[in-house]
Image (cartoon, helix red, strand yellow):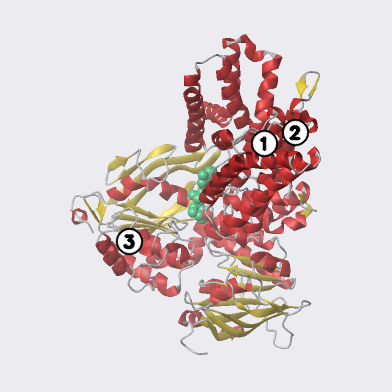
């Protein structure tokens, strides 16, 4: 976007180079001797399993962290001792994996954070508002809304838009598409192509093969902190080859054997759920059934999931088998006591206690089960934590590791472990595999499948059509706070799901 | 971390372990800075004045640390849930006056009167908890106003006089000694152990850390956040009440501004000891370290006969250094 970046013939074809980059945290080697060059005006994919070092690498490039060893060159000039602010000034913008949002500021202020239009040290509020309104066009986000009240997807978009409009020459997106809808993705990709045509370079991190294949020109793969491979020509690869490159082995994709429950009595009966955003007269679930909820943001999928768990005050009743019909739970504790467990789509905000250890997080919702009259039983707690630490395949030295130090995907596994450890009868998962790598994703889907076989009823809220197709027996597509379409059996296909609620079944 | 077979061998570097080792030692030193600083000051004061190591003085330090310890422990609890209670020192003074007056004016037996005082302190803690959870009052301001109310109430209650009409039973614990060693610190040790057990071994303690670490996530994890905060404030009030009794018993008097002088030290002690003002981090051992450090500074400066005009300033600088070193540790070694 800056005039100076118009390609000059004798320019170095590589805008960004890292040489022998190493990052250690105490005994942990997060990144080891990585050398990499990124071609000007391309979209460079960065792939790897959870904990491979992707976020660490882009954190070093963007000035968020300081390398232990090695050098980074931007436009041929070495960069050292810089911070995020300096790098943004130099034209490198990073959208971090976890939303970076100031809750008590408005959406507009969050968009303009640090790039405020100002004159003589005073913020030009009118210009700020106008610019923000322009940036938010077509996103349905109110510029004056408090950011803390926005949902996870909207908060994510604020970060992405801030970077895209920041006028940078290198824009780094760390898993930007996790939990975005199909349209959002399309919009983002169109925008990326448009900026690329203007000479902007992108580093794009994603666990979705189809995205890498669609948008990237080149890609690099990290494995356990080491550069394990890459290609200058992504177009020549298939999705299977990409998975193999990432995992170092072939990948068996999971596919659930779909069941129908036509002649069984439901074990979960939800009636007349109503709040400001929802009107669901009736919703039933069978023992061992897995139902997918999808829909555009605000259409009701997430809202119903949260209402069932007591996170949004709502009218309505729920009857679980063997229990009397009751009002919807008033708070999460009441929900857990009824046998309902919920995984939030925003692990940072209401998933993990980042300052506590993996083990303490896993047992947090099941403390009563590992205590007698209020006193914790250390062995029982340890056994529980250890069990889910292993089941979820969390990559860390031990369950005593503090969650803050884990990679994004591994933090997600901790959340999931805590929820599963409660032994629920009704399991509600909002974007369960958000940020989880292709390999582990299949494991998670297998675990959920196994739970359903032991009689647990599952609701999966997801914008990932592929995941829904692979994991569920039935799909509910939401629109305007109601279930508009239900699909089951053969009718569940990626193509059909992408059409959304409009095309009536 | 598992090593991958396809990974290229990383450059062997011989200089590395040494540097890492040095860094490790530095990290350890900074991590235990409160205790190292404490030992250094003890040696320093001891060398300066032989009197510092006399039994009498060590006993004095223990007794002084007891009251500060009780109140510092109380202050630490709301900090752990990412709130604060500034009214605890005032609560300590006010509740002990209530206890004393319940004896002298209502004629209750001293033990019952003392319990009334502790109960009042506990109730005030409970009330503070209600205000900041159910009414969503900001704890800093709510407890600041409560502090002013309680200080005023103490003044009104005593009419500016010092209550000295304390029964023998009441003052016994403050004076009692076995073989010359005061037994009052035993109460502090018991309180330390109790709070440590609560924090480390109970569902309540785990919930306290969780709520302080991330209240929104705690709620979603099935913890009743408001309830935990109220319980925390209530326990803090109780500890302040016991501290009030101990202070009255030890001084054999309750002044019209009893407890108020503890405010800054009571807040400084847990923070120096590593209790985070942002909640969720800190432990009882740290609080003990902070309390001992502050007490040694106070007593030591008095002993080495620093002119009294300088005591406040030098004490402040010593606290500043401790906090600054801790900040450096968090910045570079966390
Ligand atoms: N502050 C820290 N202290 C200690 N170890 C850390 C810290 N931050 C990251 N690590 C470790 O560094 C490694 C790489 O983490 P990183 O976040 O870069 O992974 P990632 O490739 O982004 O994974 P994901 O796909 O899960 O986001 C992990 O093993 C992680 O545990
Ligand atoms: Mg990451």
Choose top left, top right, bottom left or bottom right for residue A281. Answer: bottom right
**Total marks drawn?**
3
Residue A198 picture location, percent across and down: 24, 62
> Are the residues tagged 2 and 1 within 8 Å (C-beta)?
yes
Q: Are labels 3 and 1 assigned to the same chain?
A: no
Q: Nearer the viewer, residue A325 or A134?
A: A325
Label 1, secondary structure: give it: helix
- For residue B70, which numbered disc appears in the image? 1
Q: Is residue A252 left or right of residue A9?
A: right
Q: Say which element carries label 2.
A: helix
Camera-side residue of A216 and A162: A162
- Cα separation, mark 3 vs mark 2, equals 62 Å
Viewer-side label of 3, 1: 1
User: Which tag, 2 or 1, sits closer to the chain's start?
Assistant: 1
Q: Position of residue B45 (x, y in %)?
A: 58, 15
Kindly report the distance in space between the C-alpha atoms of the residues bearing marks 3 and 1. 54 Å
Q: Chain of mark 3?
A: A
Q: In the image, is the residue at mark 2 within 8 Å of ligand 1 by its beta carbon?
A: no
- Left or right of B137: which side holds B170? right
Residue beneath label 3, please? Answer: A164
Measure how far apart labels 2 and 1 are at the Cα level: 9 Å
Label 1 crowd (10 A; few <14 / some 14-19 / many >=20): many
- Residue at 68% x, 37% y is B244
Q: Position of residue A345 (x, y in %)?
A: 54, 65
Q: Mark 2: few, some, or many residues within 10 Å (few <14, many ≥20)?
A: some
């Amino acid at each position: 976007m800056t005039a100076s970046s118009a390609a000059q013939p004798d320019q170095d074809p590589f805008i960004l180079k890292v040489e022998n980059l190493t990052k250690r945290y105490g005994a942990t080697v997060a990144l080891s001797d990585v050398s990499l060059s990124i071609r000007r005006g391309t979209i460079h994919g960065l792939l790897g399993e959870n904990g491979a070092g992707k976020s660490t690498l882009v954190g070093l490039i963007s000035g968020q962290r300081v390398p232990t060893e090695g050098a980074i060159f931007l436009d041929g000039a070495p960069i050292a001792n810089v911070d995020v602010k300096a790098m943004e000034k130099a034209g490198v913008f990073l959208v971090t994996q976890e939303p970076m949002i100031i809750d008590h500021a408005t959406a507009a202020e969050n968009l303009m954070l640090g790039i405020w239009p100002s004159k003589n040290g005073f913020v030009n509020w009118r210009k700020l508002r106008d610019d923000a309104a322009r940036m938010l066009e077509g996103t349905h986000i109110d510029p004056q809304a408090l950011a803390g009240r926005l949902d996870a997807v909207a908060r994510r978009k604020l970060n992405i838009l801030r970077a895209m409009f920041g006028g940078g020459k290198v824009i780094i997106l760390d898993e930007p598409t996790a939990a975005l809808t199909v349209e959002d993705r399309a919009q983002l990709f169109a925008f990326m192509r448009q900026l690329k045509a203007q000479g902007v370079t992108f580093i794009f991190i994603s666990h979705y093969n189809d995205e890498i294949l669609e948008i990237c020109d080149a890609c690099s793969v990290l494995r356990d902190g080491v550069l394990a491979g890459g290609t200058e020509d992504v177009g020549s690869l298939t999705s299977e080859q990409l998975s193999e490159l990432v995992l170092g082995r072939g990948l068996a994709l999971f596919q659930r054997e779909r069941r129908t429950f036509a002649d069984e009595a439901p074990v979960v009966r939800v009636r007349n759920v109503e709040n400001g955003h929802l009107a669901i007269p009736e919703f039933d679930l069978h023992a061992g059934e897995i139902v997918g909820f999808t829909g555009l943001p605000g259409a009701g999928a997430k809202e119903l999931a949260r209402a069932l768990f007591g996170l949004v005050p709502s009218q309505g009743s729920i009857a679980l088998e063997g229990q009397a019909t009751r009002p919807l739970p008033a708070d999460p504790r009441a929900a857990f006591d009824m046998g309902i467990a919920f995984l939030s789509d925003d692990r940072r905000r209401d998933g993990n206690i980042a300052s506590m250890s993996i083990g303490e997080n896993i047992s947090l919702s099941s403390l009563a089960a590992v205590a007698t009259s209020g006193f914790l039983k250390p062995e029982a707690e340890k056994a529980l934590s250890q069990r889910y630490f292993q089941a979820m395949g969390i990559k860390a030295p031990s369950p005593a590791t503090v969650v803050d130090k884990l990679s994004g995907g591994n933090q997600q596994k901790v959340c999931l472990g805590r929820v599963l450890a409660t032994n629920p009868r009704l399991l509600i998962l909002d974007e369960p595999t958000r940020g989880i790598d292709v390999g582990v994703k299949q494991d998670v889907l297998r675990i959920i499948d196994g739970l359903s076989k032991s009689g647990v009823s599952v609701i999966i809220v997801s914008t990932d059509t592929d995941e829904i197709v692979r994991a569920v027996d039935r799909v509910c597509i939401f629109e305007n706070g109601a279930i508009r379409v239900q699909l089951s059996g053969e009718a569940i296909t990626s193509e059909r799901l992408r059409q959304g609620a409009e095309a009536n079944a | 971390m598992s090593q991958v077979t396809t990974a290229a061998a990383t450059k062997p570097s011989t200089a590395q372990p040494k540097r890492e080792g040095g860094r490790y030692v530095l990290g350890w030193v900074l991590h235990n800075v409160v205790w190292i600083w404490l030992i250094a000051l003890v040696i320093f004061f001891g060398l300066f004045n032989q009197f510092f190591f006399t039994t009498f003085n060590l006993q004095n330090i223990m007794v002084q640390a007891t009251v500060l310890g009780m109140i510092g422990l109380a202050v630490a609890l709301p900090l752990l849930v990412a709130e604060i209670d500034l009214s605890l020192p005032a609560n300590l003074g006010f509740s002990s006056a209530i206890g004393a007056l319940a004896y002298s004016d209502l004629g209750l037996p001293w033990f019952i009167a003392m319990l009334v005082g502790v109960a009042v302190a506990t109730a005030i803690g409970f009330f503070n908890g209600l205000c900041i959870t159910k009414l969503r009052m900001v704890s800093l301001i709510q407890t600041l106003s409560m502090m002013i109310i309680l200080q005023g109430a103490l003044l009104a209650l005593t009419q500016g006089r010092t209550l000295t009409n304390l029964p023998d039973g009441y003052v016994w614990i403050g004076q009692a000694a076995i073989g010359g060693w005061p037994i009052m610190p035993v109460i502090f040790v018991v309180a330390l152990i109790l709070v440590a057990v609560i924090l480390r071994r109970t569902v309540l303690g785990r919930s306290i850390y969780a709520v302080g670490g991330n209240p929104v996530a705690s709620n979603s994890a099935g913890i009743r956040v408001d309830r935990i905060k109220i319980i925390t404030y209530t326990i803090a009030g109780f500890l302040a009440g016991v501290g009030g009794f101990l202070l009255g018993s030890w001084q054999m008097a309750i002044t019209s501004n009893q407890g108020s002088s503890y405010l800054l030290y009571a807040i400084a002690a847990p923070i120096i000891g590593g209790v985070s003002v942002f909640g969720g981090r800190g432990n009882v051992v740290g609080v003990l370290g902070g309390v001992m450090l502050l007490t040694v500074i106070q007593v030591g400066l008095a002993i080495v006969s620093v002119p009294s005009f300088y005591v406040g300033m030098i004490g402040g600088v010593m606290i500043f250094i401790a906090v600054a070193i801790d900040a450096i540790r968090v910045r570079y070694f966390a």
